[in-house]
Image: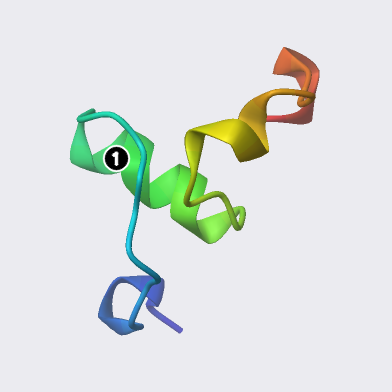
Amino acid sequence: MDNLNKATPESELPKSSKPARRRLYNAGFYRFDQLANVTESAF
């Protein structure tokens, strides 16, 4: 199923490329503070 057509909550992430935002949204991240304790290897 294509996740691009799903409604996403209002994002508070800084501007970034569409592929980067799509990957973050698909992982469930919509706010910058949600990434504070995530390690690089988790991506």
In this rendering, the count of numbered labels is 1
In percent of the image, x 36 and y 50: which residue is there? 22
Q: Could you tell me residue 29's position as x and y percent?
A: 56, 49
Q: Amino acid at mark 1?
A: Pro
Q: Nearer the viewer, residue 19 or 25?
A: 25
Q: Taking 39 as reference, is 34 above or below it? A: below
Q: Taking 35 as reference, is 19 above or below it? A: below
Q: Could you tell me residue 18's position as x and y percent?
A: 21, 42
Q: Taking 29 as reference, is 35 above or below it? A: above
Q: Taking 13 as reference, is 27 above or below it? A: below
**Figure quadrant of residue 12:** top left
Mark 1 Cα within 10 Å, few/some/many (few <14, many 20+)? Answer: few
Q: Could you tell me residue 42's position as x and y percent?
A: 78, 29
Q: Could you tell me residue 25's position as x and y percent?
A: 46, 55
30 left or right, relative to 18: right
Coloring basis for residues? rainbow
Q: Nearer the viewer, residue 40 or 33?
A: 33
28 left or right, relative to 30: right
**Figure quadrant of residue 6:** bottom left
In percent of the image, x 49 and y 44: which residue is there? 31
Q: Quadrant of the C terminus?
A: top right
In percent of the image, x 38 and y 78: which residue is there? 2
Q: Nearer the viewer, residue 28 or 5?
A: 28
In percent of the image, x 20 and y 30: which residue is there? 15
**Residue indicated by mark 1:** 19
Q: Secondary structure at mark 1?
A: helix
